[in-house]
Image (cartoon, helix red, strand yellow):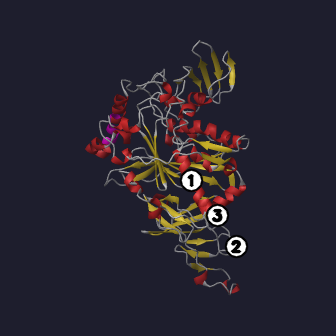
Amino acid sequence: MVETQTGHDRSDGISYDDILRNDTVPPPAVYLENSPLAPGVTRVPVEKYFSREQHELEVERLWKRVWQMACHESDIANVGDTYVYDIAELSFIVVRVSENEVKAFPNACLHRGRTLCDSHRRELKVFRCPFHGWSWNLDGSLKEIPGHWDFPSVKAEEYGLPEIRVGHWGGFVFINPDSECEPLENFLGDIDRHFGIPFERRFKAAHLIKVLPCNWKVAQEAFMESYHVVATHPELLGYFSDVNSKYDVFGNLSRAISASGPPSPHTGLVNPDMSSYPDKKAFTSLRHMISGHVYRRLGENRVEVTLQDGRTGIFDQYAEYIDGEVKSADIQMCSWVGGAICEGEEDTPMEYSTESPHAYRDEVASARREALRPQFGEGVEKISDADLVDAIYYSVFPNISPWGDFNPIFYRFRPNGSNPEESLHEVMYMVPLPEGVPMPEAANCTYLGVDDDYCDAPEIGSSLAKIFNQDFVNHRQVQKGLHSHPKGHTIFASYQETKIRHFHQTLDKWLSSDKAPLSE
């Protein structure tokens, strides 16, 4: 049984603020702030997820005039390092001109439009077009035109590369193609007060980009709420607060916080329950907290399902029937148990205190403090329980998602070229470091095609990779189903899908305005 009607506009589960009041190390005050979006109904026409007209409107009124993260400073660490940033059909080059200066230009030769850089480059001296050899200095000034005598109208002062506005926040480089845009600082507002450790003190420990078979908004929306946990991530139900998560909005930011420790209100339990892991291992077996069915790994892509009456069936990781009395299975349970596991993580333990939510949070937080102690010393005693155990995830309009201080996840979602039904899911691990510790070298990026498994990027670990694989099960099917949606529009929960509602309200402002909206 799951929680359905409660007689009011929130879950009956314990509130996040009440959970925090019992923590051993209290949270930052900002986590206790309440800034909910006004309740309401948000419906989005399905065409906004696949139509060519919508895609072109987003290019013209969003991507050509909004502040957007282009790259990390570590991607252009040395003078001449150049990053190619693509968004839809648009392409830009971001270059370190000097130790303290970064510039950005359209990635197009002013002769006949060929891209100046086809991929990221290290320590360039000039931008030289591979077609006819026109070249520019790193600062964008015209350097040389072969046969310049044949272009009498081309004046050096008129044919420098046009500069794109550049801004910096948290070690990231932002660009805005709109020369009349508001400052990045205005756009981001008071974002810094939400993070105790500035993003400038974080290094890129992992980086991957995967192609997804869905619109970029479909992809992003899958990572903006915990409402989907009950169906998509059932392995979390015994110790994760999903429908009683907390949602707030702050200007161009939105925030969700989901607590670890208290079980999902869908289970009817008060204390965490780890019996969903019969082997006390994370990936080899799983008992569904609501149905009671047990899924056991027989090998990669093979799962045995046992019902409470003892009947069994064999399925692959996509819940396709192979053998046995039981003819149907939960695809997400099969994905978790039967899918790939990163090498060396097959026996990952899964056993924590079930005495109470507070005991669970204490145990997990204490273990993580000890793991951080070699770097942070006695400073770990001041790190809040919430920062160590909870999912605290922000969205910055239009397409990035930085997580809280000690969860290193950072997402970006983009259209994949001109195809409105494909997108790029980008994952970075931005690991915090204490003051005075030198920044390690940034990780290289792993590229995954649409058919590649997230476990093909073992640097992110099996737990997160397998969660992404569960989300991936939905992506293609959501995109397909939108074309047949009988209502012709999606509808979003008033509170639990706050971040998605806020995103669409903000997006609609941008797409309906002749001039870029100013931040409030």
Answer whether residue 412 is visible to the viewer in this image: no
- Pointer 1: residues within 10 angstroms few (<14), some, or many (20+)? few
Residue 422 vertical placement versus 317 (above, below): below
Quarter of the image where the N terminus is located = top right
Which quadrant would residue 329 be assigned to in this image? Answer: top right
- Counting residues from the start of the chain, the first of labels 2 and 3 encountered is 3
Instruction: In the displayed orientation, state which residue is furthest to the top.
Output: 309
Identify which residue is drawn at 55% across, 51% down: 503
In the orientation shown, which residue stands out farthest toward the left?
Answer: 378
> In this rendering, which labeled residue sits more in front, label 2 or label 3?
3
The verdict on residue 76 being magenta is no
The local crowd at label 2, few if under 14, some if 14 to 19, many if 20 or more residues have their Cα within 10 Å, is: few
Nearest the viewer among 501 and 62 is 501
User: Marks 2 and 3, how far apart in space?
Assistant: 22 Å
Magenta residues span 366-373
Alpha carbon distance from label 3 to label 1: 18 Å
Tell me the number on the disc at residue 60: 3
Residue at mark 2: 112
Q: Tag 1: residue type?
A: Gln
Quadrant in which residue 257 is drawn = top left
Q: Specify which label sits upstream in the sequence, 2 or 1.
A: 2
Residue 131 appears in which quarter of the rendering?
Answer: bottom right
Mark 2 touches mark 3? (CB < 8 Å)? no
- From this view, report whether residue 189 is shown above or below residue 141: above
Is 371 one of the magenta-colored residues?
yes
Which residue position is annotated with label 1?
A: 505
Tell me the SS state at disc 3.
helix
In front: label 3 or label 1: 1
Q: Nearer the viewer, mark 2 or mark 1?
A: 1
